[in-house]
Image (cartoon, rainbow, N blue to C red):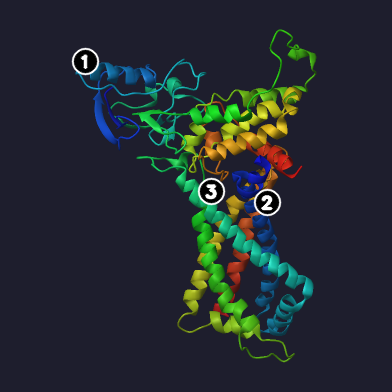
Amino acid sequence: MNLTLKIWRQAGPDDKGRMVTYQVKNVNPDMSFLEMLDVLNEDLIAKGEDPVAFDHDCREGICGMCSLYINGEAHGPGRGITTCQLHMRSFKDGDTIIIEPWRAKAFPVIKDLVTDRSAFDRIIQAGGYISVNTSGNTIDANAIPIPKENADKAFDAATCIGCGACVATCKNSSAMLFVSAKVSQLALLPQGRVEAKERVLKMVHQMDLEGFGNCTNTGACEVECPKGISLENIARMNREYLAAVIS
Amino acid sequence: MEVKSALLGSSIVKKYWMALTGLFLCTFLVVHLGGNLILLKGEDARLSFNAYAKFMTTFPLIKAVSYLLYFSILFHAFDGIVLTLQNRAARPVKYYFNKPEANSTWASRNMAFLGTVILIFIVGHMSNFWYKMHFGDIPMDANGNKDLYEVVVTFFKDPSLGIVYVAFYVLCMVALGFHLVHGFASSFQTLGLYHKKYNALIKNLGLVFSVLVPLLFAIIPIFIYIQ
């Protein structure tokens, strides 16, 4: 396959940035999208040019590092996948592919396609944990009976890999799906109930401080989420928050 | 400290107010529509419509609720403007190429625009009818009530501009329909009322509401015009 790539290039946080067009030849349809970018970068390095910076780590869809807004969609076309799980067979020979970084005030561009997603870390630090003694006296989690339905819902919420596709795809750059997943995974379990009220208030407060937008319930996040995190989590967080604010 | 700031400025509290005022305005639409439908009786409606209008503007309980209504309209608009400005600020650099239609509906992405159209409509609508009913010098009917029926009919039957008013009215009702088709179900989600048993019901109820209510509203000026 031969492809035309239009890629956002930005030398650093203060650079204005621009779209640059590249030609990439002899792409194998079985390559992942990131491998295709590796091919481009090898070519750029051989020519003495600056390779395109992009985030990646596990390349098997579980770490949440890869991002990329491809042809107007977070993680590109296809549902329930990250960019590393997107294969070049999803495109046709001769296609033009537009590649941009996540766009949000809270996710500033560091270089090219790499954004700073530490806003998510600060939201977790604000309350996305349970305070337990881990000094050797940890209680066996299985000692506490938990309804199967709650365990399943908590696990579904916990599959969020924090990639930021929800923020990237939301017209308001809202982080509600991410935050609600992190609130839900703990709020649904007895271990998490102890600090539930404080947690939801602190995490939402931090979310607002980071400059994410508000939720319009367009549902775009749920569609583009590689892990299929449900809007049900946002509703649950809204309930948790209401209960915490008025009690 | 967090609780205090949450009550005043939190993103989620702003959305609760949007949902609550929005749902309250939905109930108002039903009441208002009920009264307007009297107009479909044609000339026979004159006395009953005027009596209804008098009741709605003088009965103490209705008057009290009407102040809550004015406040809700203004607050819904104000809150919406604040949310929209914050949402725009949250993405200072736009995408070079975006495909939002792949994952969301047009109405859900254009609530601010649709709301603005509705607000412009309300301002015009209130100056044409509400203001005249409350403060205007309008004739009396046979029962000694203000003849609002005459005001409405004269307005939409205006030989030169009547058709423009009717067209504008119908267009605004289309905007209202799109605003409601997202807003109705969305307000339940905001208030945390999500359950797989009821989601489809809420969505379908919202769809019926957002088609039926604006449609019935729109029929009235068309009926008056062609009558």
**Do pointers 2 and 3 mark residues of a single chain?**
yes
**Do pointers 2 and 1 mark residues of a single chain?**
no
Tag 1's secondary structure? helix
Q: Position of residue A126 (x, y in %)?
A: 61, 30
Residue that carries the numbered disc 2 in the rendered image:
B205
Tag 2's secondary structure? helix
Kind of residue at badge 3: Ser
What's the distance in space between the residues labelled 1 and 3, CA to CA?
47 Å
State the quadrant of the N terminus of chain B.
Answer: top right
User: Residue at point 70% right, 78% down?
Assistant: B53
Tell whether B117 sits left or right of A130. left
Residue most extreme to the top: A136
- Confirm whether residue A231 shows in the render: no
Which is nearer the N-term, disc 2 or disc 3?
3
**What number of labels is visible?**
3
Residue B84: mark in rendering: none
| Residue placed most toward the observer, B109 or A109 | A109
Residue that carries the numbered disc 1 in the rendered image:
A46
- Confirm whether residue B84 shows in the render: yes
Residue B108: mark in rendering: 3
Residue most extreme to the front: B1
User: Residue at point 70% right, 69% down?
Assistant: B66
Q: Position of residue A230 (x, y in %)?
A: 61, 33
**Do pointers 1 and 3 mark residues of a single chain?**
no
User: Residue at point 66% right, 73% down?
Assistant: B36
Kind of residue at badge 2: Leu
Q: Position of residue B204 (x, y in %)?
A: 66, 48
Q: Is residue A214 above or below residue B221?
A: above
Q: Position of residue B148 (x, y in %)?
A: 65, 83
